[in-house]
Image (cartoon, rainbow, N blue to C red):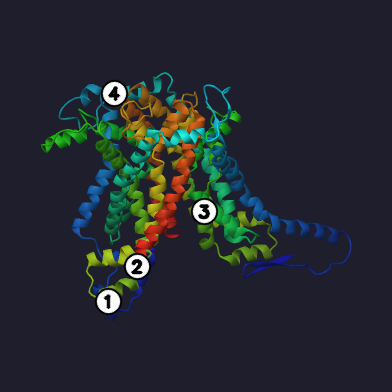
Amino acid sequence: MTTTTTGGASVVHETPPRPPGRRRDEHGWRNRLSRWDFKYMPYVLVSPFFLLFTVFGLFPLIYNGVVSLRHWRLDNPAADGWAGLENYKRLFSDTAFWNALINTFGIFVVATIPQLLIALLLAGLLNRKLRAMTFFRMGVLVPYITPIAASTLIFGTLFANNYGIANQLLTAIGLDPVNWRAERWSSWVAISIMVDWRWIGYMTLIYLAAMQAISRDIYEAAAIDGAGPQRQFWSLTVPLIRPTLIFTSVIATIGMMQLFTEPLLFDSNTTSASGGSAHQFQTVALLIYQTGWKNLNLGYAASMSWLMFVIIVALAGLNAFLTSRLGRGK
Amino acid sequence: MSKLAEKTHVDTPPQTHRRRRLFRAPNDTPAGALTYVALIITIALAVFPLYWMLVIGSSSDRELAQIPPNIVPGNQLGTNFDYVFNTDGVYFIRSMLNSLVVSSIVMVSVVFFCSLAGFAFAKLRFRGRNALMVVVILTLTVPNQLGAVALYILVTKLGWQGELPSVIVPGLVTAFGVFYMRQFIVDAVPDELIEAARIDGASTLRTYGSVILPTIRPAVGVLALLSFTATWNDFQWPLIVLGGSEHPTVQVALSALAAGQFTVYSRVLAGALLATLPLLVVFFLAGKQIVGGIMEGAVKQ
């Protein structure tokens, strides 16, 4: 049997008739096996992903909606039953949730804008004919492969009150030391620095890859117009990698909405999940963890997750829409 | 990509050579001294926290309380490691073995299943292929952390709470892996090769083994490294499902170490050093491939 593929559709050529006998039977069997292989094997190959995603990805997301409509406490399984919209009613008047939402968005803004801007500039620097190119590219990626738990604990010592490097540097240049964990603004800045330290290198490489995919002819045309390197970068390179800018801002948005490890381990009590003495850096992901596994109220935690899911989907859509509109306006 | 650029540059006829100097693209322009200075400062900032981890992890806490502080590694590394290994309820040595086992299983499984699925999406024709691929891409953007409550209930029902299967099984095939392998196979394997194998009567699996596997070795390496690293570093889900159990992964054990010792930085950071070291070794050996993999993946988005 032979098969050829033409323009997306596949044609199975029947083998010419064979003389009767054992040979033919064997051939028919093989033929059928082969046809089965051709027709159904692709589904077998892709099925592990879909099976696993259905069970451990899709089902939990949907089932979360069911849990959010029930009373579900880890310490009291007997207190089970439908809660209706009770969890959601409580959620809308829960100041802890709105506080966590403000913190999440606040840290998102403080961290993401400098992160993407610095990554863009760094990619511009790396997008040159460089000696030791591999060294520089690997160097910027070191934070990305460092475990978040480890790096957060390191930054915890850098931002320590008395002996932390950050405060010693501030004192050295004549400024007052900062109690980094105590204030809303200072804890947001400290957490943003941790987040940016981790992600700038990764984003830089994404931008760099996009910049290197730009055709050289475009730069030649710009050179005729007399654009210098600065103008070349801002009015040629940056607009040309717009799809990548949109992509990175979407993944940064989704990532920041789930910020968890940094605010958990930056706290001086690394198990409380309260995000500081007055919840000044408690993010939504942290509040969900605290509600579900510290206060043992899974039903309520599920309703928070669902609301957050809706917010993230809306935000990712809005983000993509706005970025593409802004880009087109240029 | 830059190799290709070098080639076209060499191929340019001599008379246009003078013009090219005026019309250089940024990546043909040699970097100036300022660029190098800025890049070296960047690398220093990227590496400094890791160096600081070594300094603190190898000092005694008394040395840390000096002003000005120690800025070179001390000689207490062994003492601090001893403490990390022997703290009750942390299970640090076991946790490192657990992480090694979990990350290795996930790595092998992801590479195997994702390359098979990627092959199907890239080179086989079947009804619903495009729609299914769209589903794969959509799941890339779903923050699955938000299903954690229900996933926890499910895993508890399965009897895996506090056991390693809870952090292994959900990660055995990833959307990213399928997507990454598909993108690679589409470009790397010519359709003619597949057709030739078909004409020879090779089955789908045979084609995978004899045509696909030998061609995708670089992508397999990159996906293996990225999966291993991601699994080793994973924190939130392992903390939820393994926290407080006797079978933590190394990041969970590290957080347990920090929980008891939040003022004894040197011991905590000695633990952080142990939790980071295996990945630094991997990165030292194969960082170039990881960089290449991330950049290739980015262009194809």
Identify the residue at horizontal 67%, vertical 68% (top origin).
A4
Q: Is residue A251 above or below residue B13?
A: above
Q: Could you give the CA–CA distance between mark 4 and mark 3, rounded to whole angstroms?
A: 44 Å
Q: Is residue A181 above or below residue B296?
A: above
Question: Where, quadrant-wise, is the C terminus of chain A in this rendering?
Answer: bottom left
Tell me, for residue B137, which label it has, or none: 3
Q: Which residue is mark 1?
A: B17
Foreground disc of the pair 2, 3: 3
CB within 8 Å, label 3 to label 1 = no
Pick the front one: A55 or B88: A55
Assign a secondary structure to mark 3: helix
Foreground disc of the pair 3, 1: 3
Co-location on one chain, circles 4 and 1: yes
Identify the residue at horizontal 37%, vertical 24% (top origin).
B259
Foreground disc of the pair 4, 3: 3
Q: Which residue is mark 2?
A: B6
> Where residue A288 appears, x then y in whole percent?
44, 34
Q: The residue under label 3 is which amino acid type? A: Ile
Q: The residue under label 1 is which amino acid type? A: His
Co-location on one chain, circles 4 and 3: yes
Q: Which residue is mark 4?
A: B263
CB within 8 Å, label 2 to label 3 = no
Q: Could you give the CA–CA distance between mark 3 and mark 1, rounded to whole angstroms?
A: 45 Å
Q: How many marks?
A: 4
Place residue A184 in its image quadrant: top left
